[in-house]
Structure formats: structure tokens, C-alpha cells
Amino acid sequence: MGNIFARRGEYEQARAFSRIGIEASKELKDQHNLERFYGAIAFTYMRQGVYEEAYPLMIKTLEIALEKQDTAYQAWALNGLGGSADALGKVDSSLSYRKRSLDLAVAAKDELKITGGLCNLGNWYFNRGKLDVAMDYYQKALVRAEAGWEGNYKMTEFYGTILRCIAGVYGE
């Protein structure tokens, strides 16, 4: 239910359901769902631009993922931390989180997360005026998106996003 509310932009309701899930997961000692409920709440705050609330929840999500040795969710949480840290002006942390997320995605051979990580790093450098470095990351992401988009709508979305990012480098 929480995901449905979040997709509809009804973030308070989404958080209410996730908080119920957190309590149930704690009672059941269900670390798998606990990390996901914390991440879901953090995501709603990020969607609203309330990064000071999202950041500690992403830290909590990462801690649980590390404890569980859940590499995929570590990469997801690190990516979210990168975005939150950047929005909060924690520039060095932001870059470090983004790079660590990409490293984990590469180790897991997760093409979707690799492509997203490359694009996010491109954005990081683009936002700091380092257009050559940004373009290098965008080009790498574009190659992966082109190779993996057949039958994968998420990769197709990335492809369009990457093309818009590249156009931004050229000032279009």
C-alpha cells in the first residue's frame, strides 16, 4: 500500500504504512523488510526535497544492508545518500557515496545500477562545471543503455535521460 501512495504523491500516507511495516519488521526481526521500509520513507522525503529527513534514514538503510551483506541494497542506499548529501551541501561525501554505489553495482554486474551510477556521476560533475568528465560518464552510460534496452523499459528510460544530459553539456 505504501508504494501505491508514494507513486500517487501521497507521501504522508506512504510513510504511515512504512512506519507500520518498520514496527512489524522489528517485532519479527525481519531485517530484509526493515531496510526496505526505512528506504521507502527516505525515498518519499527525497521526492519532496526534504533531504535533512531523508539522509539519516538512508544511513539507517545502509547500516542494515551492510549488516545483512545485501550488496544490491547497499548500492541503492549509497546512491540515495549521494543525492541527499549533495542536496545538503556535503559535496565530498556525495561523490564518495556515488562512487561506492557504482563500485558495488559493477561488482554485482547489475547493468541497470551501473548505468544509473554512471549517469549520476556524470550529473555530479556536470553540476560542478566539469563538462569533459561529465561527458565521459554520460558516454559510458549511453553505451550500456544502448546495449541493454531491449525488453528493459527502465534502461529505455535511462537512454532518454542520458541523451538529455548530453544535450545539457552542449547547452541545448
Image (tube, rainbow, N blue to C red):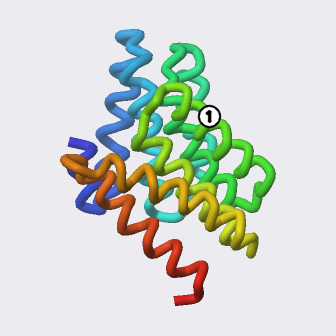
Q: Looking at the picture, how far across and down is residue 30, in whole percent? A: 38, 14
Task: Check disc 1 and give the amino acid type.
Answer: Asp
Q: Please, is residue 107 above or below residue 10 in the view?
A: above
Q: Please, is residue 95 above or below residue 161 in the view?
A: above
Q: Residue at x 46, y 30 (%)?
A: 109
In this view, the residue in front, 129 or 144, is 144
Residue 158 sits in which quadrant?
bottom left
Q: Is residue 72 left or right of residue 103?
A: left
Q: Is residue 27 left or right of residue 8?
A: right
Q: Looking at the picture, how far across and down is residue 8, in whole percent? A: 23, 60
Q: Residue at x 29, y 39 (%)?
A: 17
In this view, the residue in front, 144 or 40, is 144
Dot 1 falls on a residue whose secondary structure is helix
Q: How many marks?
A: 1
Q: Residue at x 70, y 60 (%)?
A: 88
Quadrant including the N terminus: top left
In this view, the residue in front, 8 or 95, is 95
- Residue furthest toward the right? 92
Q: Residue at x 55, y 47 (%)?
A: 80
- Residue furthest toward the top? 29
Q: Residues within 10 Å of mark 1 (few under 14, many from 20)?
A: some
Residue topped by disc 1: 103
Residue 126 sits in which quadrant?
bottom right
Q: Looking at the picture, how far across and down is residue 64, in whole percent? A: 54, 22
